[in-house]
Amino acid sequence: MKIILITFVTLTLISSNCTMKTQHILEYKPEKLQTQNLNKINIEPKGIIEIEEDENNIIQQITSVAIIGESNTLALINGKDLLFYDNTTGKFIKKIEATFEMTDLVAKSGRKPYIDSNYERRKVEVPYISTTNYTQNGIDGEIAQQFIKNFFMSLKNINNTFYSFGTIYCYYIGSSEKSIDNIPVLFVLNDELNIESYVVMDLNKNSHAIAYDFYINNYIYLSAPGMYKVPAFGGEFDSYPTAAKYDLEGNFIKSVSHMTNNYLLKGGLKNGWVYPRFIEVNNHIMIVYPEELAVFGENKKLFDLQNLPFKNDSGFVYYQDYLRYCRSKEMRPDIDVIARLFPIKIIDAFENENKFYPIILVWDKNKPMGFYYLIQEYTSDGKLLREVALDDEPENQIRQFAFNKYDKELVLFKKSKTSWTAEKWSLR
Amino acid sequence: MKMAILVIAMLVFANQTLFEQLKEKCELSKNEYLIVIFQTPGNCVKCFIEPMDLVELIKKNSLGINYKLMALVSVEREIELKVFQKENDWKHYMLVDDGNARKDLGAKGIAMMIILDSRGKIMAEFLPNQYDKNIEKAKKFVKSR
């Protein structure tokens, strides 16, 4: 009887403790910090173009965008398609589809699925299977077409050339079971906007690259999450890789960034990958993460972002408990709670005249829409010079940013009930 | 007069519950069930195949059970339904999910598919990544009819 009573009391205490803890998280409000009034980045409206849509090219979401000012071309990724437009008129030029057949680029590249003894299907070295060898490997071509939905993922203008990474799926048969890998393939486009060449990336067990973002100089930098902890930040602690460096043929060289202590605290791999963004400033690669309020170089922190109105510290601490609470209630995480846990989110960044510009989403209840965008200007060594805040409109919301280096234009891609527009602002 | 009728019609439509809209859209009759899958264009392949496998299972084993299939698609513009239709070669009913569909139909926030009777009562609810449980639920639904 005593045991039952003690168990009951203990369970009641644990349960009420959990509820109290969750209640605290659900009601958490980030503290507003004192900020300085800095010089304002001058941005002035320059013009708006409507992006042409038709039955065959309905833009649902712009996942990545790049502009080559010199050739007056705007490129964007919409689902599996890469679409090109005239940057002055918004008129559609052409599209490149990520086709099912692209799977053969991987199969015929000589790359092989990586070995990982922790997975039955990855224990032995086997080849990728080309579409012509489906029948002899027991793969139904029709079913394969249902599963293999290749798509373009990220896009950049680097020195007036469009580069786009696609996620290309390819079958392999490891330990008699059929599996599919997702392999990033870099496509290089020529002036006629055709694919001129491609590079199939090398995956390994601790660098399964997913081309969320990339940069190319003498190397290819790519978001490349790893499944196992390795010494990180100069051996300071062990963590999961998040980004890797490759030679221009796509061969892996090394991991260059890892989950910070904050991301480990947030739950590490348990709560998903962490995707970095890459920007080159003054010939140095800079790496930023959505919630980590700092700028990183290869395997080191460069500087903290400054003069921000909130911190994300509590979010990293509370996030796991909040997710646990959502799972127990079989509900999706509430955007309102997430916004309070992580009031600052780095959504993009660009370079201009050797300066670094992070684009930051600030969740602030006191603003009419509950948030605003903050663009800051830093020198390459982390000195904050200027900043500017941008408000959004409820009926015509900003969905993507781009910087046109040639025309010095910040371009806001907005979506309304009727159309997509690109709003151009000159930046001085 | 025309204007008044239009306004009344708009008011009636505005007050219609989501289930009533679905029922009207697919002309659901008394002895029919409505299978609703919740979709987002550009989602992973698995997110489409998982509920469709369950639909296939119900179809194969449901001799005498009449149902209609509806996709509630999370898009912002009606025109974007065509993206979903094309991507998945969708030949059934579909409507825009404004983000509140699960809540309006009384489903859990993470539900990937539900089966409703002709009065809008949830007869079975399927959650993602619960492969075995979902198959059991589908079988149970078929058996109970």
Image (tube, coloured by chain):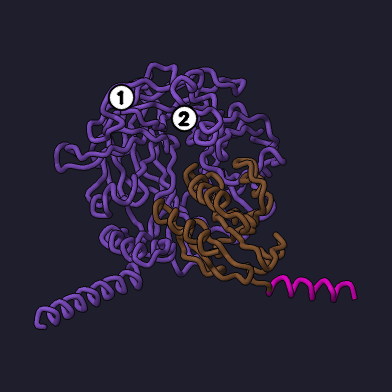
Asked whether the viewer can see residue A239, the reply is yes
Q: Is residue B6 magenta-colored?
A: yes
At x 27%, y 31%, the residue is A205
Name which residue type carries label 2: Ile
Q: Which residues are magenta?
A: B1-15
State the residue position of label 1. Answer: A252
Disc 1: host chain? A
Magenta stretch: helix, strand or loop mostly: helix
Residue B137 vs A414, above or below: the answer is: below
> Seen in the image, is A44 located left or right of residue A40?
right
Name which residue type carries label 1: Phe
Q: Position of residue B49 (x, y in %)?
A: 51, 45
At x 76%, y 71%, the residue is B10
Q: Position of residue A171 (x, y in %)?
A: 43, 28
Q: Which chain is brown?
A: B
Q: Is residue B14 magenta-colored?
A: yes
- Quick check: do tags 1 and 2 share a chain? yes
Q: Which chain is purple?
A: A
